[in-house]
Amino acid sequence: MATPDQPDAGAGAENPVPPAAPLLATVPPGRDSWQGLRALTDARIALGRAGGSLRTESLLEFRLAHAGARDAVHTPFDLAGLEASLHAAGLETERLASRVTDKQTYLLRPDLGRKLAPASIDRLEAARGLWGQRDLAILISDGLAADAAHHHAAETVTELARILREAGWTLYPLFLVPYARVKLQDAVGGLLGARHSVILLGERPGLSAHDSLGAYLTFQPGETRTDADRNCVSNIRAGGLPPSAAAQKLAELLIASRRLGLSGTALREEGGPTKIAPPSPGPDLRGVSGADRQ
Amino acid sequence: MVGARRHAFATLRDLMARATPRRSGDELAGLAATSAEQRAAAQQCLADVPLALFLDDLLIPYEDDAVTRLIVDSHVPAAFAPVAGLTVGGFRDWLLAYDTDSTQLAALAPGLTAEMVAAVSKIMSNQDLILVAKKCRVVTAFRNTLGLPGRLAVRLQPNHPTDDPHGIAASIVDGLLYGCGDAVIGINPATDSPASLDALLRLIDGVIRRYEIPTQGCVLAHLTAQLEAIQRGAPLDLLFQSIAGTEKANASFGITLELLAEGHAAATALGRGTVGRNVMYFETGQGSALSAGAHHGVDQQTLEVRAYAVARRFSPLLVNSVVGFIGPEYLFDGKQILRAGLEDHCCGKLMGLPMGVDVCYTTPAEADQDDMDALLTLLGVAGCNSIMGVPGADDIMLGYQSTSFHDSHYLRQVLGLRPAPEFEAWLEKMGIATGGTRLLPVGAKHPLLIHGDA
């Protein structure tokens, strides 16, 4: 039984090691005696306290992490830079636009981010005949974190295109679309008559990861498709699922989707090659719709 | 005529939407007032609407929606009698009267429909929402007693991105040593596998039994998954479900009122409560119906209160509005989240629910932890039953920012709020806290750490 006269911190060092609390050699000043538990989770545990409140260090660390996430949401999409990387990799690109023209509207009006701007509809209709019907339309957007597209999209897409071309797939030019939502792939894919579509876009930044890319694929994209018809590969970033591995996973899913002639929940259940996480973070209300928020 | 112009409102549903304080979700739905003056005019019109009109002019038709049928069929005219002759504006005055107290409000609750409660909240100021909520008292019990005056409970939320039992156990120990967990030890699972669900239920049950903690556990999986876990013999205390304010929105969550009734009966039959029999835990949030394309042209705040009509049918231990989780397209910034949090708490209390709030936001929202401090403080003043305790306010599984264990101690200190009495006694016994509000130093030999392998 603990007693009130035990010290706040530092007492752990000379005590026996408890089973689930591997102790650090020393507990830093101000931290809790159960510091060792931090090895078991990335959660912000054993922070110590000032009275009952956060210590200065923890308070400012949180602010820094949140500031990074806030900046990530508002970072502008560097289309020219991304085009340069893709062209260097020998990939063709085409710029399109959703009906959103600024970040605030993007955040407030997800419905507009799911639709193509009239000029882009005209462009696709005009080019459709020239391109002919192809297997896959790939879209890249800044989504909620432009740096995700800046850092990981070119590498992911280059590798994905390489694998699929080797497998005999034909691809449309890569569509770069600022301010897109996941469903915009239905508008593009549907207009072109593509057999598959994939959209890669920046995921909602968390406190620890600010440049995480998400990818959503759809078989026979079109207006009637819903999130249940899609498969998702998320957390694409250096410290998560690396771009090359993500490309491999996406390619496997696409190939399985083609073989089975379906995508979404049914693909997950009917033996997609890889067990992938559902797009929503949990079955409760908080998930509302994982794909829809992107 | 209001101001310089004449304003006309086609239907009661339209009037309700346009009288709603501004929020992005109603604008997204195309239901919001088109000007500040139109909103103020709508509030004046709404204040003159007789409360009884809501019994006849149903915002969502009876034949179209099971939640409407529940609301109409469960209305108790005798309970409604004290306010039956009042307008919405008159009802606000009645609620604020010195003589209106917790006993009267508890007796009135079965006489109020969700739409009446939503209506009056729309014309109430933030201070009204706080004062009226403060008058309400809703006490529930399972292994401890929640909602008593001067008490504030905390849900310990030890989530982990892969449901790793060791990672979750570490966060549970952390929360308990910070004096949190009296509302529930509740995990949002990252995966939907039955084996993982059973393992998490056993993990929480093991901790609660080993340390004889007067609290309850919950894994916030889908209701049907929890029912299957019950049949497998997994130790389930509280049955969780997300709910919404229309039949169609609930269908999008994979539930019906019948399924909720079945779940309620199954969880009650387990008889695992020691001091009470409230076995349900519900979560809600403004915007969920619109998000599911199931809003019937009704504003998101009214639909939220209709979700409370669903909740109260099943006498829950906890109801929690996850207010800022849904994102900026429904509640744009700190101001909108704060208003919605106060509305949800007050309306839930008027409906007779043990209302708690997950004071939270996501990174795209124009909000930060200072906004949460403000809402947290106001909810403490308003007598909120429970808040969330997330390590460092950073949920590493759900990826949003909530309130921390430390935040609860801020609130305990400034408002003198103590944990549930049974839990407070346990904290004293374990040498974790004293006097209900003050944490004690905990050394590495503390029993929770020595046996921290639970």
Image (cartoon, coloured by chain):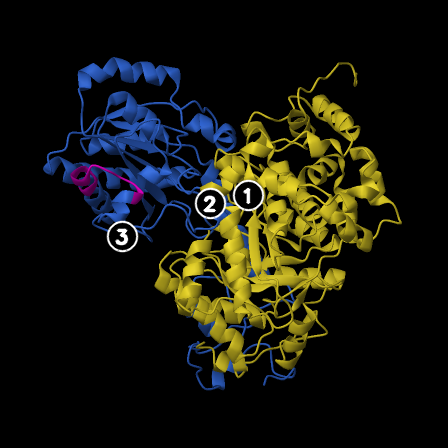
Chain colours: A blue, B yellow
- Mark 1 residue element: loop
Q: Nearer the viewer, mark 1 or mark 3?
A: 1
Magenta-colored span: A256-265
In the rendered image of this protein, does residue A45 appear above or below residue B326? below
Q: Amino acid at mark 2?
A: Phe
User: Quarter holding the N terminus of chain A?
Assistant: bottom right
Q: Indicate whether A232 appears above or below A20.
A: above
Label 2: element kind: loop
Mark 2–mark 1 distance (CA, rounded to whole Å) = 8 Å
Q: Label 3: how many residues lie within 10 Å, few (<14), some (14-19) or many (20+)?
A: few
**Image x and y of residue B49, in percent:** 77, 29
Label placed on residue B253: 2
Based on the displayed image, in which of its 4 quarters is residue A254 positioned? top left
Which chain is home to disc 2?
Answer: B
- In the depicted view, which residue is nearer to us: B111 or A287? B111
Tell whether label 1 touches label 2 (CB within 8 Å). Answer: yes
**Which amino acid does the dot numbered 1 rest on?**
Ala
State which quadrant residue B97 falls in. Answer: top right
- What residue did someone put label 3 on? A275
Q: Percent x, y for residue A68? A: 48, 46
- In the image, residue B65 lies in the stretch drawn in magenta: no
- Find the distance from the CA under tag 3 to the CA under tag 2: 23 Å
Mark closer to the chain start, 2 or 1:
1
- Tell me where residue A121 appears, x and y as whole percent: 33, 17
Q: Residue at x 50, y 74 (%)?
A: B207
Residue B211, numbered circle: none
| Discs 3 and 2 lie in a common subunit | no
Label ID, residue B244: 1
Q: Chain of mark 3?
A: A
